[in-house]
Image (cartoon, helix red, strand yellow):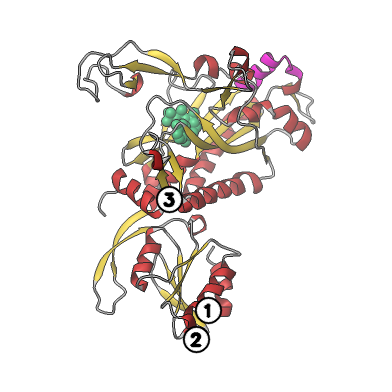
Amino acid sequence: MPELTMDKLVALCKNRGFIFPGSELYGGMANSWDYGPLGVELKNNIKALWWKTFVQERLDMVGIDAALIMNPKVWEASGHLATFTDPLVECRECHERYRADQIDLARPCAKCGNKGTFTEPASFNLMMKTWIGPKEDATAVAYFRPETAQAMFVDFPQVLNASRKRVPFGVAQMGKAFRNEITPGNFIFRQREFEQMEIEFFIHPSEWEKWFAFWRGEMQRWLGLCGIDAARVHDLEVPDGERAHYSKRTIDLEFDFPFGLKELYGLAYRTDFDLSNHAKFSGREKDVTYTDPISGEKYVPHVIEPTFGVDRTLLAMLVSCYDEEQAPTTGEGGETDTRVVFHFPKTLAPIKVAILPLSKKDELTSVARPLAERLAKRWRVEYDETQSIGKRYRRQDEIGTPYCVTVDFDTLNDSAVTVRDRDSMKQERVKLDELEGYLKNQF
Ligand code: ATP
C-alpha cells in the first residue's frame, strides 16, 4: 500500500469534511482546526463509546462535567502554576521560538539557518491565562484548565457524598483542555485547544500495582474497539526524572504516526499527590480523607489515571483505518482501479448507511428518500442521488461508510434493495421491510 503521508491525510480530511483549517475565511489561524460534518460525527462516536465503555458499563465509575475555568488556587495546589512548564528558546536572529527539549541546540535554526544563536532555555508556563470580569488586574486572573483531571480531585468529596461509592471507584470526565504550546503542529496532534477523556480511579494505596495493571489492560482493549493498529502502538516506561511532577510511575502509549513515534495516551500512578495537596491548600483535610466502612481505616485514597486525548485517538484511527486497495470497478468488464477506504469499526463510522437511488427518476427517489428519512431516525444516514453508482460507492468508501443501500428499478417489483458491504464489497439483496433488522444486526 502506498504510504499515507500527512499531506495526503490533511487534504482528504479537508475535502471530505472531516477536519478543516480553522478561520479559513480570514486566511486561517495557525494550528487551529475545525471538525467538519464527518469529523464531528466521528469524534462524537468516539466520545460516546468511551463513555459507554468506561462509565456506563461499570458499576464502579461515575462521571462529571465540571466548569472549564476553576478557582485559580486549584492550579497552585496541583503544581501547575509552578511546574507546568516547557523550556523555551528563541533564535536571536529570526526570533523563532522552539521547545529546547525538542530540538538539537547545536544545529542551525530550522527557520533562518543561523547557527549558535539560541537564547538560554527559559521556563514557559503552558497555562492559558484570562481575566474574569471587567477588571484586568491580578485579582481577576484565572486559567483555562490545562487538563480535565483536577475537577475530579476537587469534586471528590462531593462525588463521594452524593454517589455513596466506596473505594475502589473512579470518576471520569471528558472535555476541552487548553495549553499554550510553544510548538503546536502535526495537524491535530498538538493543538492549543484540544479534548481529553480522563479517569481518576481512587484506590487503597496497597493496591496500586494491581489497578495499574488492570487499567493498562483496559487501555489496550480500548485501542482494539477504536480499530487502532496494535502493531503501531508501543509502551514507553517513562524513567525517573522525566515523569510529570505528580507521578510515581507512568507508561506512555506511543503511536507510530506518519511524523514519528509520539505519545497517544498516558497511564499514571498519581499517588495521593493531588488529593493531599488540595487538602492542604483548601484547609479541608477531613473532606478528602476516606473511611473504610468495613475496617474503619482512615486514609487519603491514591489514584491511577488513564488519560486519553480525543483528537489523538481520532488521528490514530484515521492513520490505522486508511487503506488504498485495488478493487474491481462497478462495470462488468473485470477492470480494477484504486479505491481509498477507511475501515473504521462500523459503530464508530461517521455515516452508517448511504441510501443511493440508481437514478434520479421520481419512481426511485420516491422510495429512496422516505427510506433514508426512516433510517435516519436510528442512524446517521447520507442520501445521495448524483453521479454514477460506482463513483458514489467510491465516495462512501472514502469516508468509511459501512453500508450502501441501492434502490434500483427491480425494487419497484421485488420490494428489495441491494446492500453493499464496505469491507468485502459483497452485495446482498434484502427485502425493504427486513432492512432495518438487517442493519441492526451489523451495528
Ligand atoms: P506531550 O508529551 O505530547 O506534550 P503530555 O505528556 O503533556 O503530552 P498529558 O499531560 O499526559 O500529555 O495529557 C494527556 C493526553 O492529552 C495526552 O496523552 C494526549 O492524548 C492529549 N494531549 C496532550 N496535549 C495535547 C495537545 N497539545 N494537543 C492534543 N492532544 C493533547
Instruction: Give the secondary structure at mark 3.
Output: loop
Left or right: 56 with respect to 435? Answer: right
Q: Which residue is mark 3?
A: 18
What segment is highlighted magenta in the picture?
272-286
- Identify the amino acid type marked 1: Val
Three-letter amino acid code at disc 3? Phe
Q: Where is mark 1, residue-wise? A: 367
For residue 398, side relative to residue 367 (left or right):
left
Marks 1/2 in contact by CB < 8 Å: the verdict is yes
Q: Does the stretch in magenta take in 280?
A: yes
> Secondary structure under badge 2?
helix
Q: Residue at x 35, y 40 (%)?
A: 256
Q: In the rendered view, would you say 36 is above or below 197?
A: below
Q: Is mark 3 within 8 Å of ligand 1?
A: no
Residue found at the very far top of the displayed protein = 120
Of marks 1 and 2, which one's residue comes earlier in the chain?
1
Query: Quadrant of residue 190 in the image?
Result: top left
**Distance Cα–Cα, label 1 vs label 2:** 9 Å
